[in-house]
Amino acid sequence: MIRVRTFTSQLRIFHTRNELLELDEAVNDFVSSHGIRKVFSVSDAVTTGVKGEAIGIIRVVTYEEPGEGARGKVLGKMEKKLNVWGEEIETLRGKADELSAGARTKWKEQVEELRAKQESARKKLAEMKKSGGEAWEDLRAGTEAALEDLKKAIEKAVRKRKE
């Protein structure tokens, strides 16, 4: 099935080069993370402000939706991330024993929040495995967001632990 995806970036004076590099990176990440093998076209359009000045860019990518093998690969990658972060959560849980009583309680609460985020991502992944077509794409976006949320929360906990 042929699909179309758009990406946007705001353009700020003296920052355009970096913004274009970020846009390229977002498109490349999308293509690689979705297992896309065939891209038919990539086109850019500049959006303008009231005075005609360039204020943004829209990139449109037309691609062939990957087959079932690529879908399995995407699900496998997500499951692997979830398992790795689960191990990280267990490592963080083990660090609680090294803390004072007050800090330990707070740390355990934080670990429980991480486990809740992990469980939420696990449920979304399970829903995604059962779905197909348009629903799969919608659930994929939600699952990726949940995984990203979990990743950021774990990174934050690790930073706090190091401080």
Image: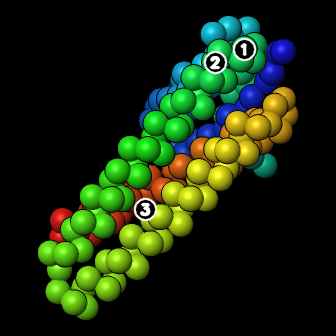
Q: Where is residue 145 in the image (x, y as percent from the top left)?
A: 60, 50
Residue 153 is tagged as: 3
Point out which mark residue 67 bears.
1
Q: What residue type is labelled 2?
A: Ala
Badge 2, how many Cα within 10 Å: few under 14, some, many 20+? some
Residue 23 place in picture, x, y as percent: 56, 32
Give me the residue at 36% from left, 59% from top.
89
Q: In the rendered view, how is the structure colored?
A: rainbow
SS at mark 1?
Answer: loop
Q: Measure how far apart labels 2 and 3 are at the Cα level.
A: 28 Å
Report crowding for label 1: few under 14, some 14 to 19, many 20 or more residues within 10 A (C-alpha): few
| Amino acid on which disc 3 is placed | Ala
Numbered disc 2: secondary structure: helix
- Determine if residue 52 is in view: no
Quadrant position of the N terminus in the picture: top right
| Disc 2: which residue | 70
Res 109 quadrant in image = bottom left
Which residue is pictured at 25% across the width and 85% down the height? 103
Q: Is residue 133 visible?
A: yes
Q: In this view, does 154 lie above or below 75?
A: below
Q: What residue type is labelled 1?
A: Gly
